[in-house]
Image (cartoon, rainbow, N blue to C red):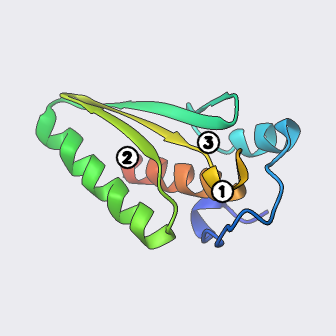
Amino acid sequence: MIELTNQKCKPCEGLVAPLTVDAATILLQQLDGWQLQDNQINKCYSFKNYYQTMAFVNAVAWISHREDHHPDMVVGYNRCDITYTTHAIGGLSENDFICAAKVDKLFND
């Protein structure tokens, strides 16, 4: 199995089916602290201050641009809630898990 952080998102134009709950649950085991809820995965990251929060948000934006797969983010003074889903298919795709793993790696490095 190839580690999620070593994979690249594939373009998704809505021509594939969303992952099943079983498939999503297996991929979720490769992530740290992400929650599966309905047709999305989410996680809240905490920081010491606003500057660190915004630096993280900007780095996530860069990852999103490079992967061409974008999360919903809710940003506060010392936290950032990130939610991934693949809107084009109305559910989760492998892209969501690839990006989540890359965001975790960013946070942990």
> Where is mark 1, residue-wise?
88
Res. 38 mark: none
> Where is mark 3, residue-wise?
31
Q: Secondary structure at mark 2?
A: helix
Instruction: Give the image quarter of residue 5.
Output: bottom right
Q: Is residue 4 above or below residue 22?
A: below
Q: Residues within 10 Å of mark 1 (few under 14, many from 20)?
A: some
Residue 82: x and y in percent read: 44, 38
Q: Amino acid at mark 1?
A: Ala
Mark before the other along the chain sequence, 2 or 3: 3
Q: Amino acid at mark 3?
A: Leu
> Given contact means CB atoms under 8 Å apart, are the residues at marks 3 and 1 in contact?
no
Front residue of this view, candidates 19 and 4: 19
How far apart are the two marked residues, 2 and 1, measured between alpha carbons?
27 Å
How far apart are the two marked residues, 2 and 3, measured between alpha carbons?
12 Å
**Who's the residue at 68% across and 68% down the image?**
13
**Who's the residue at 28% across and 48% down the image?**
56
Q: Secondary structure at mark 3?
A: loop
Left or right: 108 in relation to 96: left
Instruction: Give the image quarter of residue 76.
Output: top left
